[in-house]
Image (cartoon, rainbow, N blue to C red):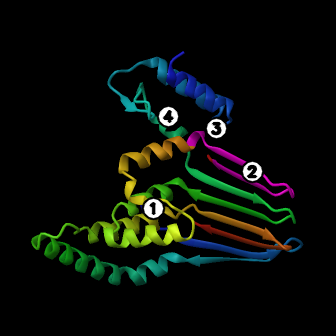
Amino acid sequence: MSEDRARILNMLAGGKITAEEAENLLDALDSNRPEKTAYAGSAGSVFKGDPTPLLEALPKFLHVKVDGDAGEKVDVKVPLALVRSGLKLTSLIPPQAMEQITSQMADKGMSIDFSNFKPEDIDELIEALREMEINIDGKDGEKVRVYAE
Amino acid sequence: MFPPMLLYLRFGTEERPGFGLWLPLFMVWLILLPIVVLVLLVTVLVDVVLFLANQSYHHYTLLLLSCFGVLGATRGTVVSIHADAHVVDMEFV
């Protein structure tokens, strides 16, 4: 089984795409039209066929859902375009300002060095979010769920 | 990408849906447009001067355009909070 085919089936199994979308993707994979190719994934595999269904299957939103122990609920839906734009913005911040931001964040316990982000890493990160799902169940019944859709 | 044109806010309780407000953000963008154009011209000028002075960083115009990109990407953001019988919904449309 090819890597692309396995990925589509995994997306279907994970409920990320519908059966119809999976069928379209598999059809596109089988059609093997050489005139249209698209880079798909971090492994460097080349997707042959119409890339539109694959692009449509990419996640559009990052969901953060929090269910508190006292019944409070927080639901945040952030467009991944915002994540992408924000990360690209960090690569344009002047170095002096970036040093200050990094040190201030480190003081608050977030040691993330945004200067290491490159544009190609951003696309890879967004693509990888498709597979990401975080489920946290607290001991008092609180739940946190983070996933891309 | 265009920035969000409307901001929907809803305040209420678990029992009563409360009231919703549609705020016309496009009016804010229209008012800010002359200022934005002016700032853009200034950044272009600054970047040209820095470039001619052989400064390593001269990307203020790109930085400003990226800020607009971030603003435009906020469209579709939804925040919903239900706590202590109060409900707050916010959506950038």
Amino acid type for the residue under numbered disc 3: Lys
Mark 1 and mark 2 residues within 8 Å of each other at the beta carbon:
no
The subunit letter for the residue under badge 3 reads A
Q: Does residue B61 sit above or below A38 in this rendering?
A: below
Amino acid type for the residue under numbered disc 1: Gly
Which residue does the image show at 56% across and 72% down from the upper left?
Answer: B6
Front label number (2 vs 3): 2
Q: What whole-number distance in Å separates the C-alpha atoms at marks 2 and 4? A: 30 Å
Amino acid type for the residue under numbered disc 4: Leu
Crowding near the residue tagged with mark 2, few <14, some 14–19, many ≥20 C-alpha atoms within 10 Å:
few
Crowding near the residue tagged with mark 3, few <14, some 14–19, many ≥20 C-alpha atoms within 10 Å:
many
Magenta segment, which residues?
A130-147
Residue at disc 4, secondary structure: helix
Residue bearing the label numbered 1: A86
Indicate which disc, 2 or 3, sits on the residue closer to the N terminus.
3
Mark 2 and mark 3 residues within 8 Å of each other at the beta carbon:
no
State which quarter of the image contains the N terminus of chain A.
Answer: top right
Mark 1 and mark 4 residues within 8 Å of each other at the beta carbon:
no
Crowding near the residue tagged with mark 1, few <14, some 14–19, many ≥20 C-alpha atoms within 10 Å:
some
